[in-house]
Image (cartoon, helix red, strand yellow):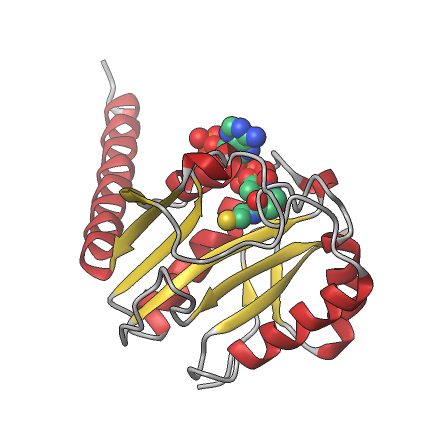
Amino acid sequence: MTQPTLHTRRLTLVPLVDEHLELEVELDSDPEVMRYLTGRALTRAEAERAHHRRRAAARKVPGLGFWVGFAEDGFVGWWILQPPHGPDQPNIAGEADLGYRLLRCRWRCGYASEGAKELIRYGFSNLGLNRIFAQTMAANTASRATMAAAGLSFVRAFISAGTYEDAVFGAEQGEVEYDITQAKWQQRQATALENQQQASLDRCTDSTREKRPG
Ligand SMILES: CC(C)(COP(=O)(O)OP(=O)(O)OC[C@H]1O[C@@H](n2cnc3c(N)ncnc32)[C@H](O)[C@@H]1OP(=O)(O)O)[C@@H](O)C(=O)NCCC(=O)NCCS
């Protein structure tokens, strides 16, 4: 399965292609966006190398990869649902790593969690994944809050086995992992549907009562 274009209420999530490179350069050249990733803005050459790594990651497992998100008024950021990678992510089939990086002007508008929820739905419903996890620095409050808002729960705190070239703010606090399993996601979907059905039943009962004379 190739990566499809995905839609949410406000976002169109398009599989990453070479034409998106300038948008990635714009994103990665903001030091605030990169605060918990590299601790500094990337140079153009580094952003280009990152683009090629992202394109290569998308070729590993059919259906997984990077998506670039657009709202009605333009570029918002990117989201990933990619195969486990790196020293802190055991390569387990049926699992995927969730992530996001948004332009600073788009923060706190609900976009990151909106896109993340759609990738989670896609991962479980369309790809049949068993588990979706996300990792971030413990100090990255915004990323942790987004994981929780997207329905993931805290799994573990750990010290990364990776080595970093740059000193990143808060690195001494270590990393955290959050996840959601397919079973838990399905259970939540079923509960949400039941609540919806009960609410419309209640509305129906109320309006019947109102129509009765006396
Ligand atoms: C992390 C990031 C993607 C969040 O994007 P966002 O669009 O602002 O997130 P949302 O608006 O969807 O918010 C999701 C939840 O996180 C909360 N949140 C977002 N930023 C927060 C912050 N700085 N502090 C506390 N809570 C925050 C929101 O209130 C919301 O919670 P709620 O649903 O309970 O109200 C964004 O800050 C970003 O791009 N950061 C730089 C890149 C990065 O660090 N990526 C993660 C690397 S692992």
* Residue farthest top in this picture: 214
Q: Position of residue 47 (x, y in %)?
A: 73, 64
Residue occupying image coordinates x 76% and y 69%: 21
As rendered, which of 76 and 172 lies closer to the eye?
172
Q: Is residue 29 above or below residue 15?
A: above
Drawn side of residue 123 relative to residue 214, left or right: right
Observer able to see residue 12: yes
Observer able to see residue 10: no
As rendered, which of 163 and 25 lies closer to the eye?
163
Residue occupying image coordinates x 36% and y 73%: 126
Q: Quadrant of the C terminus?
A: top left
Residue occupying image coordinates x 73% and y 43%: 31
Q: Position of residue 112 (x, y in %)?
A: 55, 47
Residue occupying image coordinates x 74% and y 70%: 48
When asked about the image quadrant of residue 155, the answer is: top left
Q: In this view, does 131 lie above or below 108?
A: below
Q: In which quarter of the image is the N terminus?
A: bottom left
